[in-house]
Image (cartoon, grey):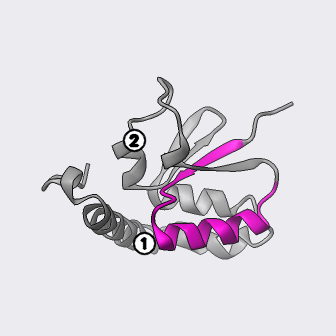
Amino acid sequence: MHEPDVLYYDGSCPLCQREMSHLARLKSDRLELRDIHDLPSSDDLPDKAALLQSLHLRRDGNWVTGLDANIAAWQYTRIGLLWRWLSWPVIKPIASWCYQQWAVRRYAKRYPSTSGSDTGA
């Protein structure tokens, strides 16, 4: 049996929690949602700070992050088609930039002692 793909998210973020609750109701069994705060340390995962900075999806052993992880996660639902427009060539650079700006600000606000001035990594 094929192991499910895994989306790692920040369970202490209210907006993230709302989106994951919605996604959990709609997703197939091929996707598992994991709160980063509930994870044990593991050599095969990025460090916790990196995981907290943006969404991370492990799909078939490969990592997809940020907006691409979000778009990919919604493809495990019957409404995934509604998210694909964010991948269109004209839209994707703008949507990716907006997601990254939001993710950096969210991380700096939620984790000010660890974010420092270089949160865009």
SS label for mark 2: helix
- Give the residue number, with chain letter if any, for mark 1: 95
Q: Residues within 10 Å of mark 1 (few under 14, many from 20)?
A: some
Left or right, 67 with reference to 74: left
Q: Amino acid at mark 1?
A: Ala
Q: Amino acid at mark 2?
A: Lys
**Which numbered tag is attached to residue 48?**
2
**Which numbered tag is attached to residue 2?**
none
Of 104 and 72, nearer the camera is 104
Q: Nearer the viewer, mark 2 or mark 1?
A: 2
Residue 58 found in image quarter:
top right
Q: Which residues are magenta?
A: 5-28
Percent of width and height locating residue 63? 52, 40
Q: CA distance from mark 2 to mark 1?
A: 25 Å
Magenta stretch encompasses residue 24: yes
Could one spot residue 85 in this view of the protein?
yes
